[in-house]
Amino acid sequence: MMNRLMRYSWLLLCLSVGLTACDDDRIDVLDIEIPEGYALSAGTSTIFMNSSKAYDSPADWVSGVYNSRFNDGDGLYDDVRTSSNGMGGGLGPVYAGYSCGSCHRNAGRTKPTLWSEGGSGSYGFSSMLVYISRKNGAFFQDYGRVLHDQAIYGVKPEGKLSVEYIYETFTFPDGEKYELCKPAYSISEWYADSIRPEDMFCTVRIPLRHVGMGQMMALDPTEIEALAAKSNYPEYGISGRCNYITERGVRSLGLSGNKAQHADLTVELGFSSDMGVTNSRYPEEICEGQAQVNQGSMMGLSYAQLDVSTEDMEDVDLYMQSLGVPARRNVNDPQVIKGEQNFYKAKCHLCHVTTLHTKPRGSVLLNGTRLPWLGSQTIHPYSDFLLHDMGSEIMGVGLNDNYVSGLARGNEWRTTPLWGIGLQEKVNGHTYFLHDGRARNLVEAIMWHGGEGEASKNLFKNMSKDDRDALIAFLNSL
Ligand code: HEC
Ligand code: HEC
């Protein structure tokens, strides 16, 4: 009880801070409205926590049966799957991770280990997802979309990823130096026919932070579509657009994933495609029809049975959507306040949209359970959830990965929500950013922005060092 009272007085304090912040001179300077109560990132789902559990703790409204289901979902998410048949098992025969939490540690971004090692060793675990396709966009018959670089005992992984980084030093107009590094990926130790690099596109993703998953699922698609219609700022070269996905005959707005290539939280796909765990939506082994399935059968594994139930998967969905969103920190620090002004001055907010709203009815989980608490909230995700062309120029490639996902082209990416980004180092112990983790800190992440992000990047680049530092301090307060 005391705990709750204390929390609410903090909430009130933050609210009043937010309100006073609104009548200072920032609005005059910027001629734009800074959201009221902006420290409360996700309305009633905001939690006041800045520890390594900040992404991985329930919102205050989670209680009773929802609380036990939350804990069950959390367990299923983190439990290491075994290779035995049936419930709790089902890992493999080939896989990319051994639990959701192996890649999304503390509901965040497990450190991508290839960085330190220059390539995954025979048992190296990377937490990255590697997608491969032919240059014409088709999949390789013996591999499918995801390269499974791990396998259960006795089965050969599909292949191993190596990476080499190419470094280049650049200079800000004020003389400060920064360095960018561009990854060059290659795959070796193919389990079946070797694929010619000339016929392959390969793209690598590091896991996304699970901040605000429920709020993202409760977004009002019409608000995002209206944003896409409005998101056209020729003076800054910006125009965002929606991704759409048609699955099982239904066309929906894409929201999740680095190219907004999924409409839901991909629980069923995550179990199936990342871990080889079969379920009602994906009853076949991910490598069905490929050589590894036979290898597994020869070892006595039966693939007839489903490995995770729909009820269990819904608990995982519930767990992710009920996570609290950490409140902002240091909102009164003068450097942070200046940095927030600079964020608007550099036009970052034209893509990293500060304020959105959730639908009145909240969200519906994959098996029909409703979470009404997620409804009618004003939220501050710092994203428009739209696709933007991020360019192909910087270091000869830019962020273009040549990989098409739904309507998203190789050079198009969904604006990454920035809420919680300042806690990533505390939660996951590293500061790798962007879809493949090539940015080693926030400055590098910004300096990789090209294409529609070019003008905004240049506004940041031309700021004084003090102003750039302030903008970074602001990002760290999110
Ligand atoms: C091998 C590592 C790995 C495993 C295992 C894994 N994920 Fe992920 N996850 C990723 C990566 C990488 C991405 C980014 C994918 C992309 O954008 O293409 C991602 C993206 C997501 C997203 C989208 C988040 C957003 O902000 O849009 C959700 C939700 C998610 N994963 C849930 C899960 C669940 C649930 C499981 C377990 C059933 C799981 N993941 C297992 C690596 C993994
Ligand atoms: C044209 C739209 C656009 C503008 C303008 C823009 N961004 Fe981004 N931002 C993106 C997209 C899209 C990504 C994802 C790119 C990727 O992962 O390859 C991104 C990624 C980021 C990331 C990395 C997030 C993560 O967790 O990996 C940071 C930090 C960031 N932006 C900050 C900024 C700042 C600061 C500004 C203003 C100087 C800015 N952005 C302007 C679209 C934009």
Image: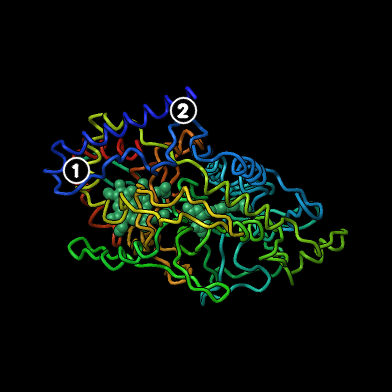
**Residue closest to the eye, 414 or 215:** 215
The mark lying in front, picked from 1 and 2, is 2
User: Where does label 2 land, which residue?
Assistant: 4
Mark 2 residue type: Arg
User: Residue 297 occupies which quadrant of the picture?
Assistant: bottom right
- What residue appears at the point 76 percent right and 55 percent down from the top-left corner? 90
User: Residue 303 occupies which quadrant of the picture?
Assistant: bottom right
Q: Position of residue 281 (x, y in %)?
A: 66, 65
From where the camera sits, is residue 298 visible?
A: yes
Q: Is residue 300 above or below residue 29?
A: below
Q: Position of residue 318 (x, y in %)?
A: 57, 49
Q: Is residue 357 above or below residue 426?
A: below
- What residue appears at the point 58 percent right and 48 percent down from the top-left corner? 127
Q: Position of residue 422 (x, y in %)?
A: 39, 38
How many C-alpha atoms fall within 10 Å of the one at disc 2: few (<14), some, or many (≥20)?
A: few
Position of 185 with respect to 37 (left or right) is right
Q: Position of residue 62 (x, y in %)?
A: 54, 40
Helix, strand or loop at label 1? It is loop
- What residue appears at the point 46 percent right and 58 percent down from the top-left corner? 258
Mark 1 residue type: Met
Give the CA separation, mark 1 to mark 2: 43 Å
From where the camera sits, is residue 445 visible?
A: no
Q: Which mark is residue 463?
A: 1
Q: Is residue 88 above or below residue 327?
A: below
Residue lying furthest top: 2
Which part of the image, by quadrant, shows the C terminus? top left
Q: Is residue 125 above or below residue 361?
A: above
**Residue closest to the eye, 116 or 225:** 225
Helix, strand or loop at label 2? It is helix
How many C-alpha atoms fall within 10 Å of the one at disc 1: few (<14), some, or many (≥20)?
A: some
Q: Earlier in the sequence, mark 1 or mark 2?
A: 2
